[in-house]
Amino acid sequence: MELINGKELAKKIREELKLEVEELKKQEIKPKLAVIMVGDDKASEVYVRNKSKACNEIGIEFEEFLMDKNTKQEELINLINKLNQRKDIHGILLQSPIPNHLNIREAFNTINYTKDVDGFNPINVGKLSIGEDSFISCTPYGVIKMLEEYNIPLEGKRAVIIGRSNIVGKPLIQCLLNKNATVTICHSKTKNIEEITREADILIAALGKPKFVKEDMVKENAVVIDVGINRNEEGKIVGDVDFENVSKKASYITPVPGGVGPMTIAMLMNNVVKAAKNIELKNK
């Protein structure tokens, strides 16, 4: 069994991006990310802090917009439109979750697709589905990068994803199809899920249930990618996979923490640099 070290790979990607940003700055291009946070979700505060730290380390400029939890939809949309217009901002990210009274879909749809570094605007979703160049949602993008880095073949392989969220499961289908894998997706209504997961050469768990994937659900020498981040009763961070037991059968497996998590932020940084190049070099 080999551990897929997302922490190390993310570090390598960030170092490469730092050099790229230095080169861009010589051409008067200063990549900049705007993050909008509505309300005071504690987990979101941590994520935003981590994003700010990563930007700082790479040399990406960072601006944060904090909105009150009672913010009206119109105010949120107005802010996004202002950021769409600003020439100095290349990437716009709306940190989720946002308060329930707000329509997150409309907000994502308002972010200009050329600045949509989270890959949630329908234009980017559509481009991904037809294999055109687009911004790919950061977590699925991170998963694909890991598989590439470890030279894990995808062509003709049977990939099974557990979880069909718009953020992870659905974009992953397209990413894997674009690499010629045969893809099956399982969700809460799937019957006989264990039978399906046992056929997977590559099993990706992204459902948000601690230790859901057990040893008997995994075939010998499968590649297991754990996207889940959950807290157990002791407050410890665990994944969607029973790592201790599943790792005995897997050929490759990602740990939690230190697997997919760091890759998500690295790919966000990658998307911001890409957006800056797309926008600025097109205008030159």
Image (cartoon, rainbow, N blue to C red):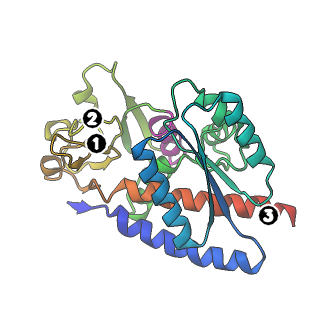
Relative to residue 31, is residue 209 drawn left or right? left
Residue 228 falls in image quadrant: top left
* Residue carrying label 1: 230
Tag 3 near tag 2, CB within 8 Å: no
Residue 20 position, x and y percent, is 63, 75
Q: Amino acid at mark 3?
A: Glu
In this rendered view, identify the residue nearer to me: 126 or 278: 278
Relative to residue 218, is residue 177 drawn left or right? right
Disc number at residue 280? 3
| One can see residue 208 in this view | yes
Residue 196 position, x and y percent, is 28, 30
Tag 1 near tag 2, CB within 8 Å: yes
Residues under labels 3 and 1: Cα distance? 39 Å
Q: Amino acid at mark 2?
A: Lys
Relative to residue 12, is residue 248 drawn left or right? left
Which is nearer the N-term, disc 1 or disc 2?
Answer: 2
Give above or below for 84 relative to 212.
below
Residue segment shown in magenta: 166-179
Give above or below for 145 relative to 210.
below
In this rendered view, identify the residue nearer to me: 31 or 77: 77
Q: Quick one: quadrant of the C terminus?
A: bottom right
Q: Amino acid at mark 1?
A: Asn
Q: Nearer the viewer, mark 3 or mark 1?
A: 1
Residue 63 position, x and y percent, is 63, 58
User: Element under label 1?
Assistant: strand
Asked if residue 174 lies in the magenta stretch, the reply is: yes
Residue appearing at x 38%, y 45% in the figure: 157
